[in-house]
């Protein structure tokens, strides 16, 4: 008789205990209080972008439209070589401006997003580029604007003063910001 009671009561107790570990909201079952896959417990707010663009398939040269080229006085648009640290499949584009005082580069960074940028030690200032969150940094050689186009990915607009000219890094920053604004506007379309 005791054996029969245990066979009936034990499964009932197990079912009752397991039922108490889950929520009843549709689509959010969380046994044991665990976070469902694909959801974040991060305290950071979702990124506000005009449109998330997966940079894995983007050719950055396509962001220099004829209108962008004319508006920014860009002389040449050429595919280039990216850097290994920007991730497998990263692409590059760039060349010079009409006045030849600066050179630019556009890079897709697939190896990490804003969190990686912030942990990299660069001094960055926060801004926007055509509605996208953007982050600017500079050193004595170049100015860079990183556009937060997708989770874990950045579009980098970098501008360097040309050697042998009277161009400056501060001037490069003005052009990097304009370049980031121009290509981000194309991203948002």
Image (cartoon, grey):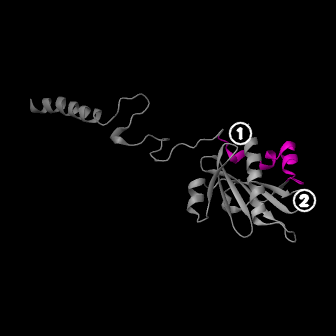
Quarter of the image with the N terminus is top left
User: As displayed, is residue 118 above or below residue 62?
Assistant: below
Res 99 label: 2
Q: Is residue 58 visible?
A: no
Identify the residue at image location x=62%, y=57%: 125
Identify the residue at image location x=76%, y=57%: 174
- Could you say which is closer to the camera, residue 27 or residue 144? 144
Mark 2: secondary structure: loop
Q: Position of residue 71 (x, y in %)?
A: 85, 46
Q: Position of residue 40 (x, y in %)?
A: 47, 44
Location of residue 32 by image quarter: top left
Specify which label sits upstream in the sequence, 1 or 2. Answer: 2
Q: Is residue 19 part of the magenta span, yes or no? A: no
Per the image, the residue denoted by label 1 is 188
The span from disc 1 to disc 2 (Cα, nearest Å) is 28 Å
- Could you say which is closer to the camera, residue 45 or residue 40? 45
As drawn, the residue found furthest toward the left would be 1
Q: Position of residue 160 (x, y in %)?
A: 78, 64
Asked if labels 2 and 1 touch by Cβ distance under 8 angstroms, the answer is no
Location of residue 2 by image quarter: top left
Q: Is residue 70 part of the magenta span, yes or no? A: yes
Q: Residues within 10 Å of mark 2 (few under 14, many from 20)?
A: few
Location of residue 115 by image quarter: bottom right
Point out the frontmost of discs 1 and 2: 2
Query: Which span is picked out in magenta?
Result: 52-77
Identify the residue at image location x=74%, y=42%: 185
Q: Residue 26 vs residue 154: left or right?
A: left
Quarter of the image with the C terminus is top right
Q: Position of residue 9 (x, y in %)?
A: 17, 31
Mark 1: secondary structure: loop
């Amino acid at each position: 008789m005791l054996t029969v009671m245990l066979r009936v009561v034990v499964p009932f107790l197990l079912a009752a205990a397991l039922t108490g570990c889950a929520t009843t909201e549709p689509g959010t079952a969380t046994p044991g209080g665990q976070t469902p896959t694909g959801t974040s417990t991060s305290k950071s707010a979702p990124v506000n972008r005009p449109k998330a663009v997966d940079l894995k398939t983007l050719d950055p040269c396509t962001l220099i439209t004829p209108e962008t080229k004319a508006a920014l006085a860009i002389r040449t648009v050429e595919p280039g070589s990216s850097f290994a640290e920007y991730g497998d499949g990263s692409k590059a584009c760039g060349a010079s401006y009409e006045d030849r005082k600066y050179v630019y580069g556009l890079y897709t960074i697939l190896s990490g997003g804003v969190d990686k940028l912030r942990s990299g030690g660069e001094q960055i200032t926060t801004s926007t580029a055509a509605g996208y969150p953007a982050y600017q940094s500079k050193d004595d050689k170049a100015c860079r604007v990183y556009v937060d186009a997708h989770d874990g990915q950045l579009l980098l607009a970098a501008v360097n003063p040309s050697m042998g000219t009277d161009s400056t890094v501060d001037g490069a920053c003005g052009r990097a910001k304009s370049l980031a604004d121009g290509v981000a506007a194309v991203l948002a379309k």
